[in-house]
Amino acid sequence: TSALLRIDGRPPLPLRLETDVGRHSASFTADLNAFGPGAWEGVLEVADLAPTRNAFTMPLRFAIPGLQIAEDQQSVNFSAAGAGFTVRGGRSDTISVDASGISAHMTLQPGGQKHLYVRGFESVTDLGTENGWREVEAKALLEDIDGKPVTDEEVGVRLYLNAAVHNDLPAIVVTGTVENIGAERSMYGFWGWLPGAAYVTPDGDTHEWTMTYHDFGNPGWVFLPNKSADRPGVGWISGETFGESRFGTMLLYTTERKPAVATGDSLTMTFALMPALAAEEVEEMAERLREKGVDLAP
């Protein structure tokens, strides 16, 4: 009898096999040290040595909790309670819910300048574990809307992204902090552009996209069913202001749209993302986050 494990397009992984002919049973052991934290999917293939080759395949899913910072410090893989998340130094996929294939990224506009985006990470620091939360902090490098790299001094801001997971919760909590190192001025920041087949609010209503820019206040959370029926949707939890874009995607703004930020002060936004199949899961997660010390209520 032979057995192989095929996981996420990697080379087949041979398994150590122990059989008990009398009991018609077998056990398989795999060395998964090469796999970092995250949610993994694969197929177990087992075949005997008969001339007609009797065989079967079985889907396999497993998760390795924790986090792993890439050697180049341009990404961090998280895994918690069976859910995987990736934080990247990328303009359009900064925070990803792996199972959903959906990402969020931040747009920043200090004092009417050109819009700014993440273009990479200058550094990523593992802040360790406190009260069950494992956290990292990434210092972002920025570029303008035209893709031109800019320095913090040129634009007068520093952007930090903090991301944390708890082993008991299939969610990631993100805080974006924009430090004003220039003169006092307005600071405009928002996250987006999360797609969905529609969106559901805490009142239970399912909303079709209006295909216009349309804010609807601070409901506390929204559920975005995935456009792909075979993948989970996304729950987005925050006390900030949610709104639609004209492209049929979800945005999250600061409650005060363009607050004045003094020199040395900061603009912050905090939210949680999670894979979800139903709105009830998102509602439950908002409560579980509160129990773990993260209150994202409006």
Image (cartoon, rainbow, N blue to C red):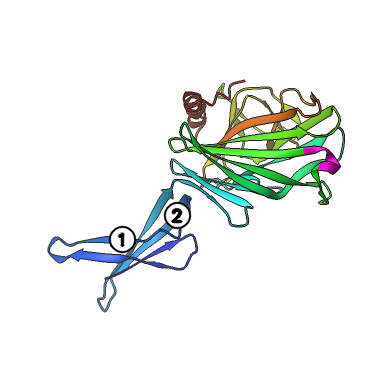
Q: Residue furthest bottom?
A: 51
Query: Going from the N terminus, do you reach mark 1 or mark 2 first?
Result: 1
Q: Residue drawn at (29%, 74%), measured in percent from left and top?
A: 53
Percent x, y of residue 284:
47, 27
Question: Quick one: 297 or 151, which is closer to the camera?
Answer: 151
Per the rendering, the mark at residue 29 is 1
Percent x, y of residue 219:
62, 22
Q: Residue drawn at (67%, 35%), measured in percent from left and top?
A: 176
In this rendering, the answer to whether 139 lies above or below 180 is below
> Element type at marker 1?
strand
In this rendering, the answer to whether 49 lies above or below 33 is below
Tag in front: 1 or 2: 1
Q: Gap in Å between the C-alphas at discs 1 and 2?
A: 17 Å
Residue 248 appears in the figure: no
**Quadrant including the N terminus:** bottom left
Q: Which residues are magenta?
A: 153-157
Percent x, y of residue 51:
26, 79
**266 horizontally vs 103: left or right:** right
Q: Which residue is mark 2?
A: 41
> Majority secondary structure of the magenta segment?
helix
Judge the density around disc 2: few (<14), some (14-19), many (≥20) Cα neighbours within 10 Å. Answer: few
Q: Residue drawn at (12%, 64%), measured in percent from left and top?
A: 22
> Element type at marker 2?
strand
Per the rendering, the mark at residue 273 is none
